[in-house]
Amino acid sequence: MRYIKLSLIALLLLPTLALAKIQPVDEVVVYKSKHLMQLKRAGKVVKSYKVVFGKNPVGHKQYEGDSRTPEGRYTLNWKKKNSTYYRAIQVSYPNAADRARAKKMGRSPGGAIMIHGQKPHWKGIEKYLTRMNWTDGCIAVTNPEMDEIWAMVNTGTPIEIFP
């Protein structure tokens, strides 16, 4: 009986212990042409994900509504636990250069660029959504992948987005 009680306690503590061992990454790198996002710690890839982007993925984001994902070095500056798209981590776009570029075109640079999951009610089409660019300029993953990313990425982590 004692063995069963100890086993039950161990099973209940296992998820907590697993989460406690998760170490944050210190960099996120995205390669748009490869549909790849890597989480890195001390220069080594810890985890890789297939990602999708805005409906117009080629080139750097120019202005609000162009459906492009920005390119360059930014910061992941805050987390939104209850996002329309499950969970989200905001990319610090636009920076000063992005604002100046859009202003020269007489446009708003836009904003609200996120790494996010999928709408929770989109059950049954999750895999389909990993095969097409469907966001308005964000970086999308599946919800289970977003849970992993959420656990490993702290606010303030740099993100570099390559073409």
Image (cartoon, rainbow, N blue to C red):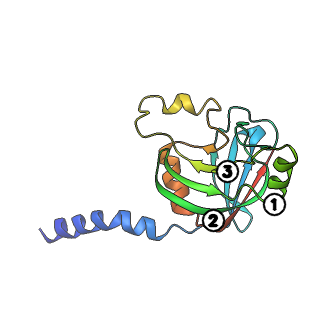
Q: Is residue 151 above or below residue 49?
A: below
Question: What is the three-letter code of the residue carrying label 1?
Answer: Ala
Which residue bears the numbered disc 3? 111
Q: In terms of image quadrants, where is residue 68?
A: top right
Q: Is residue 48 above or below residue 57?
A: below
Q: Is residue 103 above or below residue 77?
A: above
Viewport quadrant of the C terminus? top right
Q: In terms of image quadrants, where is residue 157?
A: bottom right
- Residue at (57% x, 43% y) in the render: 141
Q: In terms of image quadrants, where is residue 61?
A: top right
Distance of mark 1 from mark 3, alpha carbons?
12 Å
Left or right? Give the position of 117 relative to 42.
Answer: left
Q: Position of residue 30 (x, y in %)?
A: 72, 49
As helix, strand or loop, the secondary structure at mark 1 comes to: helix
For this rendering, which residue is in front, 22 or 78? 78
Left or right? Give the position of 31 relative to 78.
Answer: right
- Residue at (56% x, 31% y) in the render: 129
Q: What is the total number of numbered labels drawn onto the structure image?
A: 3
Disc marking residue 25 = 2
State which tag comes first along the sequence, 2 or 3.
2
Left or right? Give the position of 132 relative to 86.
Answer: right
Q: Position of residue 103 (x, y in %)?
A: 83, 50
Question: What is the three-letter code of the residue carrying label 2?
Answer: Val
- Residue at (22% x, 64% y) in the render: 8
Which residue bears the numbered disc 1? 96
State which tag comes first along the sequence, 1 or 3.
1
As helix, strand or loop, the secondary structure at mark 3 comes to: loop
Distance of mark 1 from mark 2, alpha carbons?
26 Å
